Amino acid sequence: MKQLTFYFDFISPYAYLAFHQLPQVLQGLSYQVRYQPVLFGGLLQHHGQLGPVEVIGKREWTYRQCLWLGRQLGIDLQLPAAHPFNPLPLMRLAISTDAQGYPNRNVCDTLFKFVWASGKNVSDPAHLAELSALLNPVRSADALDVKAQLRMFTDEAIANEVFGVPAIQADSEIFWGFDSLPMLRQYLEGDTWFKDRAWTEAGKLPVGIVRKR
């Protein structure tokens, strides 16, 4: 059985889509998934990048494409009342539901659907209180160890060369983005192409020019 790590932040609609498509894409394969919350903003800050919805034009495209993808795949997707938003309360709540900090699939499903299928203001304290009561966490979401664990999970993801969400780790390989799910399946099926030079040496391509910032 292959062990997978699913790195995610509830702020990402692509993470929502990937979360729901993962079982269908990997149907028939033997695998186990560990869901690891990470702060997308922390990844962006580390790599000196803007998020897709922080770029004019790309913001509108992101929402429209994700709505279309949801429609094509039969996944209920509604934009929240405002986006981006502060995901910290939701991420900490997810971590607080498990003693080790890894929320199960039902917890992730509940929180993803709250953000991407309810159309609500996800920053409303009343909604957050309802979610907490529903999920019945084993620790306080405001506990220092929960906050520290989210930072640790994010740092661990960066150390594993995760640069965005969703990202799925299989062995030492990172498969980034919703559209990489078919690639992940081929890897898990044992496609030998992933051992060829085309794959292993792609990252060694020389840099031809560095853009001034």
Image (cartoon, helix red, strand yellow):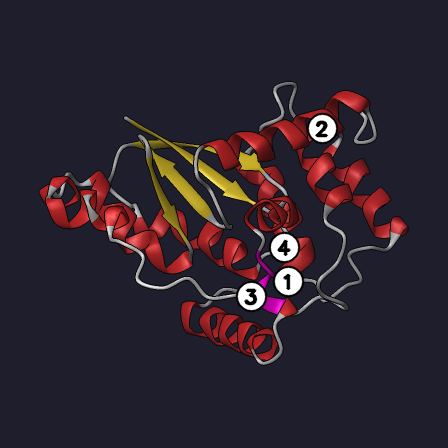
Q: Quadrant of residue 182?
A: bottom left
Q: Does the rendering let one see residue 40?
A: yes
The label shown at residue 113 is: 4
User: Do tag 3 and tag 2 residues touch (Cβ < 8 Å)?
Assistant: no
Q: Which residue is mark 1?
A: 117
| Residue at image coords 23%, 39% | 188
User: Do tag 1 and tag 3 residues touch (Cβ < 8 Å)?
Assistant: yes
The stretch in magenta equals 49-53
| Residue at image coords 44%, 46% | 167
Residue 42 at x, y percent in the picture: 64, 44
Decide if residue 91 is on the left or right side of residue 181: right
User: Do tag 4 and tag 1 residues touch (Cβ < 8 Å)?
Assistant: yes
Q: Which numbered disc flags the more N-terminal residue, 3 or 2? A: 3
Residue 97 at x, y percent in the picture: 68, 28
Viewer-proximal residue among 189 and 109: 189
**The C terminus: image quadrant:** bottom right
**The N terminus: image quadrant:** top left
Instruction: Tell me the amino acid under the disc marked 3.
Output: Asp
